[in-house]
Image: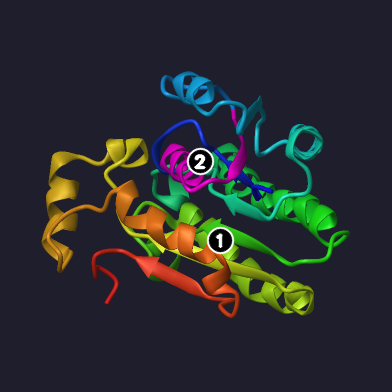
Amino acid sequence: MKRHVIVTGGSRGLGLAIVTALLDAGYRVSTCSRTQGDALPALLERAGGDLFWQQADIGDSDSTDRFIQAAVARFGVPWGLVNNAGIARDGILATLPLVEVDRLIQTNLTGSIQMARGVLRQMLGRAGGGRIINISSIIGQRGYTGLAAYAATKAGLDGLTRALAREVGRRQITVNSVAPGYLDTEMSGTLSAGQREQIVRRTPLGRLGTAADVVPLILFLLGDAAGFITGQTLTVDGGIGC
């Protein structure tokens, strides 16, 4: 039987790349996002019944609960969860509106905690283990001017990873974070040309990352070969954080 993996924020960018790679690797995938975006409808048609999408706002607990229930009804108890959905807001903390800070925390951190909680309730009722992967960020480890609130949410995900790995390890459920560096995706589209050039100069490998640089690690962590890796934050940043 094909394993079922839930991916949040799968309509574009890294999330879409993760969903596509999982389908190609033989998984059944449930994903949610606020909109389908431009590419997801074609992928839904191509997937031949192995992909389920439902509209959900990761920052709304009722919305995520409905999505988890629908995903389990469609494909059964999930083997894995990839907490990928997130937003970025650029701004000096002293002048960043509090409503934006609240939205960052609710979406990036609280929403991921709610998803992990809901999926774990399903996993713990079934023997056989499982995988939880939180997509954090190099920003949470290194910091960056204008991204203090965003950095706090991603650092929180890494803390969640370490503590949750201890809680569920005896049930053979692993919990890890993947921390990408600066990726050439829509989320980095707000960077100015000067900022991009500066990041490239500071990166030993001399370029921004791509979704294709990150996806293989996620596939590995979901697989059986990664069964003794848990509580770790694995960085994919081209060396900018070294």
Q: Position of residue 174 (x, y in %)?
A: 65, 70
- In the structure shown, which secondary structural element does the residue marked by tag 2 occupy? helix
Residue at the location (53% across, 48% down)? 84
Residue 218 in magenta? no
- In the structure shown, which secondary structural element does the residue marked by tag 1 occupy? helix
What colour scheme has been applied to the protein in the rendered image? rainbow
Q: Which amino acid type is marked by label 1?
A: Leu
Give neighbour class at mark 2: few <14, some 14-19, many 20+ (Cα, 10 Å): some
The residue indicated by pointer 2 is 23
Residues at marks 1 and 2, CA–CA distance in whole angstroms? 13 Å
Q: Position of residue 178 (x, y in %)?
A: 47, 63
The residue indicated by pointer 1 is 222
Q: Which numbered disc covers residue 13? A: none
- Which image quadrant: the C terminus? bottom left
- Farthest residue, direction front: 1
The vertical placement of 236 against 135, above or below, is below
Q: Position of residue 131 (x, y in %)?
A: 64, 62
Give neighbour class at mark 1: few <14, some 14-19, many 20+ (Cα, 10 Å): many
> Is residue 109 something that shows in the picture?
no
The residue closer to the viewer here, 27 or 178, is 27
The vertical placement of 151 against 29, above or below, is below
Q: Is residue 220 left or right of residue 206?
A: right
For residue 71, which quarter of the picture? top right
Q: Position of residue 40 (x, y in %)?
A: 48, 25
**First in residue order: circle 1 vs circle 2:** 2
Q: Which amino acid type is marked by label 2?
A: Leu
Segment colored magenta: 15-33
The residue closer to the viewer here, 132 or 145, is 132
Q: Is residue 202 left or right of residue 114?
A: left
> Is residue 26 something that shows in the picture?
yes
